[in-house]
Image (tube, rainbow, N blue to C red):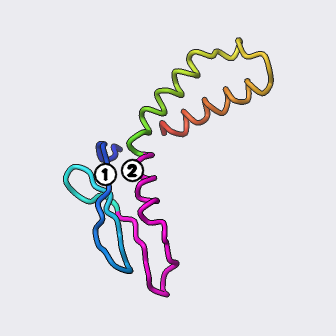
Amino acid sequence: MEHTPIPWTIQEASKGPDRDYGIMANGGVIAEVFEHGGSEYEICVDAEANAAFIVRAVNNHAKLLKALEAVVAAVAPTTLGTNELSMIFRQARATIEEATK
């Protein structure tokens, strides 16, 4: 399964007490983050920040993964002298595995 190609961007979709932000890609909305003002929903005053975080994470995912893979490739387990470094190495490898599922 493939996700929508990057880059993703943010566009304010509506203004007022119930603002929402569209996450855009390929000329269309692929997701929305809402800031509700009604009592029916929990108020999310950080909707714009949440949308920005999602876009930043998506747009940088491949670069971060590539950098982490380079670190793991450069630091072989046999060169790690302490348990702490071995633990960091294992966590890095586990993160790569999780990110590439």
* Left or right: 10 in relation to 66: left
Crowd band around label 1 with a 10 angstrom C-alpha radius: few (<14), some (14–19), many (20+)? many
Q: Which x, y percent locates residue 36?
A: 43, 78
Find residue 81 and report its horizontal and vertical position in percent: 78, 16
To which residue does mark 1 refer?
9
Find the magenta span and give its range: 32-57
Along the line of sight, which residue is nearer the eye, 81 or 3? 81
**Residue 59 x/y as whole percent:** 38, 42
The residue positioned farthest toward the top in the image shown: 79
Q: Quadrant of the N terminus?
A: top left
Going by the image, does 77 lie left or right of 83? left
What residue is shown with label 2?
Answer: 55
Q: Which mark is residue 22?
A: none
Residue 33 painted magenta: yes
Residue at 41% x, 58% y is 51
In this orientation, which residue lies closer to the viewer: 13 or 6?
Answer: 13
For the residue labelled by badge 1, is the local secondary structure a helix, a strand or a loop? strand
Q: Mark 2 and mark 1 in contact (Cβ < 8 Å)?
A: yes
Please, what is the three-letter code of the amino acid marked with disc 1?
Answer: Thr
Which of the 4 image quarters holds residue 73?
A: top right
